[in-house]
Image (spheres, rainbow, N blue to C red):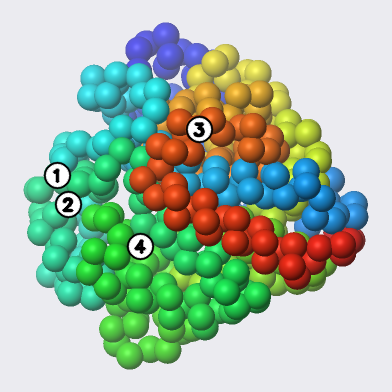
Amino acid sequence: LRTRSARTVTNFWAPFMRVETLRRYRTPLSLSLVTISCFAFLFGSADSMQMPAPSTGGMNKAISLTPAVLDRVRASLWGIYIGDALAMPTHWYYDQRHLKNTFGEIKGYVAPKEKLPGSIMSLSNTGGGGRGSNQGSIVGDVILKGKKHFWERGGNYFYHRGMAAGENTVEGPITRLITNSMTEKKAFDVDDILAKYIALMTTPDAHNDTYCGTGHRMFFANWAKGKEPRKCPDNDGHNTDALDGLTNLPPVVFFSMMDGQAALTRDSKACVSLFRESDALRKYAPVVASLLVSLVNGTPLREAVENTGGAMGVSVARGVEQSRGQDPMTACYLPSSFPSMLHFAYKYAENPRQALLANTNTGGENVARGAVLGAVLGAGTGMKAWDDELIKGLVRHREIHQEIEAFIGALVALHGGKTAEL
């Protein structure tokens, strides 16, 4: 980032920053760290945040499966895959100068590079969560079979190397299997989802990703020890309370919303607990559910986003205004990544495609943010949000189309003509 950009961020965030933090504006990476620190400082820790009640943002209304509601549900599901695939090639690029030199300005789906200098995958624990030794064999023998060499020390392989333009990271196929399970079972069946998840993750080449996050590695470290699947979710105390734990949530929200508030809250929390043990995710799940249901029920996008931020004690509108055009780069941790998602949703509410491309070109932890952002934008805009290029540019667009339409059909079969009070 140029000096002018640094001054812009400094002017906006100065009231929230410590003097010693301001002194770190020396490199593109340190600038990104300041941006991360500012979001976390402003919004507080997951434990201290003022979290919205489930009725926040217009959910205190009756909802039924009208054509308009179904159009927004459909668009929200498409948005998950579009946002994920667009951001995939620039995931965890924290040096924006390097990102720009590598890709220029990304305007659509592009394939990733094979290598990324400083790739954290080269430092990650192949036997469990977080950073650590590459002596473990969960990666290579249990999951991501045959891909452990891409995690070698000093290898600097990009997290999603080998994937095609428009292809989804591993969270995409996981979201699809959750959606398909509910369509088939006509229920949110935890055991069926876990069985499908284990089959996906342990079958060679069932997906084309090279990386999976701490939560998944810890789950399978426990599973390899013989634990029952329901007892395998775990937490390393650092990397698990992250935005990627919310990317699979939207289909569960839409499936459960017609059963009322208690079922919606219960199933939302259960969804984020499928693969990770995280109190923070269980706090955020009802927030996301509230926002999505409010949007598909017709609350204007900026109003719903501002309501969500307001219930957390901040004004998203004011933050966007005072950012002076600067979009935030953040890491994956919820106190910074979630409010940054609200920033993009509010700022680019009138142009969902531009929102997802801005997220892509910002770098940092933009894949999980792109998926959640896409779901929010689709829920607030409907299918007009996504043009044919974005839909048909997805590698699996035919399968995704069939699965979304089957899911919509299942919703109508179960709840058509029904009204729920939320």
Residue picked out by circle 2: 122
Determine the secondary structure under disc 2. Answer: helix
Residue type of the residue flagged with mark 2: Ser
Instruction: Answer left or right for 147 relative to 164.
Output: left
* Quarter in which the N terminus is drawn: top left
The label on residue 214 is 4
Q: Closer to the N terminus: mark 2 or mark 3?
A: 2
Residue picked out by circle 3: 388
Residue visible at 20% across and 36% down in the picture: 113
Determine the secondary structure under disc 4. Answer: helix
Residue picked out by circle 1: 156
Q: Residues within 10 Å of mark 3 (few under 14, many from 20)?
A: few
Residue type of the residue flagged with mark 3: Asp
Asked if the residues shown at circle 4 and circle 1 are in contact, with their CB atoms under 8 angstroms apart, the answer is no
Q: Is residue 400 above or below residue 301?
A: below
Asked if the residues shown at circle 4 and circle 2 are in contact, with their CB atoms under 8 angstroms apart, the answer is no
Residue type of the residue flagged with mark 1: Asn
Q: Closer to the N terminus: mark 4 or mark 1?
A: 1
User: Cα distance, mark 2 to mark 3?
Assistant: 37 Å
Instruction: Answer left or right for 117 relative to 238.
Output: left
Residue 114 drawn at (x, y percent): 16, 40
Q: Closer to the N terminus: mark 2 or mark 1?
A: 2
> Which image quadrant for residue 98?
top left
Asked if the residues shown at circle 2 and circle 3 are in contact, with their CB atoms under 8 angstroms apart, the answer is no
In this rendering, the label closer to the viewer, 2 or 3: 3
User: Cα distance, mark 1 to mark 3?
Assistant: 35 Å
> Which image quadrant for residue 119?
top left
Determine the secondary structure under disc 3. Answer: helix
Residue visible at 37% across and 11% down in the picture: 3
User: Cα distance, mark 4 to mark 2?
Assistant: 14 Å
Q: Residues within 10 Å of mark 1 (few under 14, many from 20)?
A: some
Asked if the residues shown at circle 2 and circle 1 are in contact, with their CB atoms under 8 angstroms apart, the answer is yes
